[in-house]
Amino acid sequence: MSGEDAVRREVSGDVRVGGSETAPVELRGAEDVYVRAESVAGKLTIFDPEHVFTDVPPGAEPADSDGVRTVLTGDLDDGYVDAADGDVFVTDAEDVFVEHGAVETVSAVGAEQVFHDDAASPTRSPDDYEISVSGWQRNRSVRDPRGGVSVRGATNELTVTDARHDLTVYVAGWGNEVRIEGQAVEVTVYFVGRDNRVSVGPYVTATTGAESGFDNELESDPLPPEALVERTEAEAYRGAFFGRHKVTYQEPAPGKEWCPNCGETADAVVARKQRDAFFLFGKPVRTYDSGDGAFECEHCTAFAIGPVELTPAERKRILE
Ligand SMILES: [Zn+2]
């Protein structure tokens, strides 16, 4: 397969193609191969892989492998293609993961299966994201990243806390876990691979942009009913210290899977309650009228503060 004057380098463990190798480069016999965004200047040709998961449309003609100048082989674990000046050939790999914009054209010859979904593309290259986790069983936590986060490799864990800016999440590989918690942000997720899981907190809106692969999961925590409580009963009474007052407050309405007001399936249903009473030291001592008002849920609430995660103290401050 390789040219006669190719340099053959025996490597063991994980191998990285970093741009110093004379191209064309052949990576032979790695288990999983990860081809990073913006990495290959020439063409990418993959011979006899099991699965190819690619965010670059496959189906190009294979490049001519006669002129291969560098062969990386040996007792290899995984391969990471981070930079290459010309064509890259991947031979005898198990799974190959090709990120968005990794290369102009991809050719997969003899693949058992090729997965590609061109439903949508990330607006910025995953190479430009502020946070990138790459490798095996890495663990990282980051607060409020801007633009995007990417995970490349297998069984990594990335936790985003306190996200306050919309985010692209790019996951290439298998068995990775990403958790996003934040407030009033939108997250778009791209999967290139299999068995990855992204979960988001209740105040994060998440959608899948594209999935080039299978068995990836995107899960959202349900919104707790407390998030729609503008004023609790205790807070309402505190404001009615002495004399006759008409107070309103909200309570979570347990056991409701849909909203009696708007009819939607809902995670958070609250009941608006009211009481017209005479108060003494913040306690109702005589009630003239009381009753349950309307129900409302996250879809039809008039409570304009959601979907923002507020501590009780913050909520109180806003209402004062
Ligand atoms: Zn409703």
Image: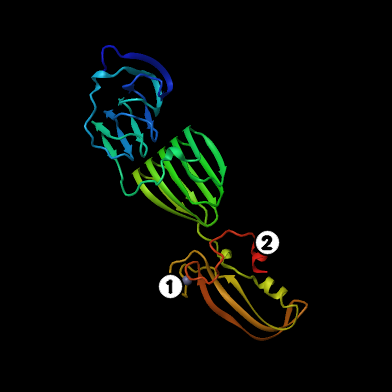
Q: CA distance from mark 1 to mark 2?
A: 32 Å
Asked whether mark 1 lies closer than 8 Å to ligand 1, one says: yes
Q: Is residue 279 visible?
A: yes
Q: Which residue is mark 2?
A: 313
Residue located 56% across and 74% down the image = 271
Mark 2, secondary structure of its residue: helix
Q: Amino acid at mark 1?
A: Gly
> Around disc 1, counting alpha carbons within 10 Å, would you say few (fewer than 14), some (14 to 19), or many (20 or more)?
few
Q: Which residue is mark 1?
A: 263
Q: Amino acid at mark 2?
A: Ala
Q: Is residue 1 visible?
A: no
Relative horizontal placement of residue 275, taking residue 280 as reference (left or right): left
As drawn, which residue projects farthest toward the right?
A: 281
Residue 210 picture location, percent across and down: 35, 47
Mark 1, secondary structure of its residue: loop
Relative horizontal placement of residue 273, taking residue 8 as reference (left or right): right
- Res 195 quadrant in image: top left
